[in-house]
Amino acid sequence: MEECNPVRTPLSPGSDLSSLVPTPSQQEEMHFIPYLAAVGSLQYLATMTQPDIAYAVSYLGCFNHNPHPEHWTASIYSIT
């Protein structure tokens, strides 16, 4: 293990995004952001070409019903 290279993960293993509840103004803001489309596209990538992002994308998919702006930010960092 001494010669192993560290690997960057798209979502930190200890991340807890489940406690985030959007305010009404944040809900209105997220109404115009294509969060569902982004998570769906990332799920396709995770299935076909990038299995290393599968955990992060499936975790973000848990918040499709009521996304917070932090979830959007996390989805953006999953692809960079």
Image: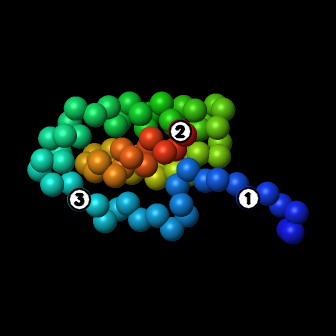
Query: Do the CB atoms of the residues marked 2 and 3 lie less than 8 Å apart?
Result: no
Q: Is residue 41 above or below residue 60?
A: above
Q: Position of residue 60 (x, y in %)?
A: 42, 49
Q: Quadrant of residue 29?
A: top left
Label 2 residue SS: helix
| Residue at mark 3 | 21
**How much space separates mark 2 and mark 1, taking CA atoms?**
18 Å
Dot 2 and dot 1 residues touching (CB under 8 Å): no
Whether tag 1 and tag 3 are in contact, CB under 8 A, the answer is no
Q: Residues within 10 Å of mark 2 (few under 14, many from 20)?
A: few
- Left or right: 55 in relation to 29: right
As helix, strand or loop, the secondary structure at mark 3 comes to: loop
Q: Nearer the viewer, mark 1 or mark 3?
A: 1
User: Residue farthest to the left?
Assistant: 24
Sooner in the amino-acid sequence: mark 1 or mark 3: 1
Q: Quadrant of the N terminus?
A: bottom right
78 is higher (above) or lower (below) than 1: above
Q: How many residues crowd around disc 1 within 10 Å: few (fewer than 14), some, or many (20 or more)?
A: few
Residue 22 image point, x, y percent: 21, 54
What is the tally of numbered marks visible in this picture? Answer: 3
Q: Tell whether 44 sits left or right of 49.
A: left
Query: Which residue is disc 2 drawn over?
Result: 79
Q: Residue at x 35, y 62 (%)?
A: 18
Q: Position of residue 5 (x, y in %)?
A: 79, 57
What residue does disc 1 label?
A: 6
Q: Amino acid at mark 1?
A: Pro
Q: Position of residue 30 (x, y in %)?
A: 23, 40
Crowd tier of the residue under label 3, counting other residues whose Cα lies within 10 Å: few below 14, some 14–19, many 20 or above: some
Q: Along the polypeptide, which appears first: circle 2 or circle 3?
A: 3
